[in-house]
Image (spheres, helix red, strand yellow):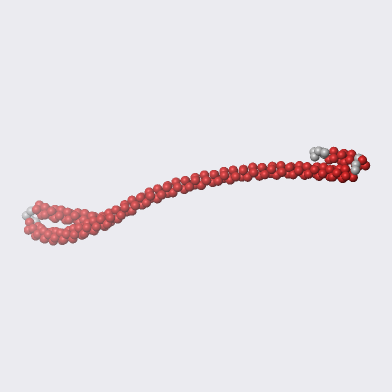
Amino acid sequence: MSDDRTNDEVEKDEDLDTSNVQRQTPEAFYLTQKMQTLVAKNVELQNINMRLMEEVRQKDFEIMDLTNRERISVAKVKQTQLHLSEVTDRAHMDLEAHGREMRAQLRGQTEALAAVQAHVKLLEETVEVLKTEKETVMVTLRQREAEHSEMSSVMENEMEERQKEAEQRFELLQMQNEDLVIAEQEKMCLMQSSLDQTSRQLQTSIARLEAA
């Protein structure tokens, strides 16, 4: 009896065997029953095997699906890692470029500051020199002013003496020569005008220096 028979075929065989029970010996009947049981077990095992094979195919499909998903996930992870690496490299390059630019700007600012400091120092030295020169000029002007004052005093004394002499001469010569008296008076006026002009110029120079 074949192991590939269906349930219907098995039932038909059982019906035929049952109808022939009266013609079988007890030993043959036992063997027949045993054979029928084995055939039924075989059919049941085949059904179980088919279900198991179906479950195996389903599991294989699930495993393949999971494998594909895992492969896709790994590819996405690799792509993400590559993108992160590119972003990190680009950020590192940008940071280095920015650092170089900032260092260059700092060097330029440092050099400019050093130049400004040198210029300020030069200006301070120039101011000190100008102060010294101003003090020297002021001392010289004071000396000249003192000399001028002394000279003015001398000239005033001389003028007074000359005026006295002129008055005396005028008194003596008034009746003799009026032209000579007028000349003396003009000479005195010129001397006074020159003295006043020199005094004004000196006072103007002193005022300008004090204002500077």
Q: Is residue 31 above or below residue 189?
A: above
Residue 189 is at least partly visible in this image: no
* Closer to us: 182 or 41: 41
The x and y percentages for residue 63 are 67, 44
Q: Quadrant of residue 161?
A: bottom left
The residue sitting at 6% across, 55% down in the picture is: 176
On screen, residue 82 versus residue 124, left or right, reads: right
The x and y percentages for residue 208 are 26, 55
* Closer to us: 77 or 139: 77
The residue sitting at 29% across, 53% down in the picture is: 122
On screen, residue 191 versus residue 41, left or right, reads: left
* Closer to us: 175 or 76: 76
The x and y percentages for residue 195 are 17, 56
* Closer to us: 188 or 28: 28
Where is the N terminus found, in terms of image quarters?
A: top right
**How many numbered tags mark residues here?**
0
The residue sitting at 85% across, 38% down in the picture is: 9
Where is the C terminus found, in terms of image quarters?
A: bottom left
On screen, residue 7 versus residue 104, left or right, reads: right
Q: Quadrant of residue 206?
A: bottom left
Residue 22 is at least partly visible in this image: yes
The residue sitting at 78% across, 44% down in the picture is: 45
The x and y percentages for residue 113 are 36, 52
On screen, residue 122 versus residue 181, left or right, reads: right
Going by the picture, which residue comes out furthest to the right? Answer: 22
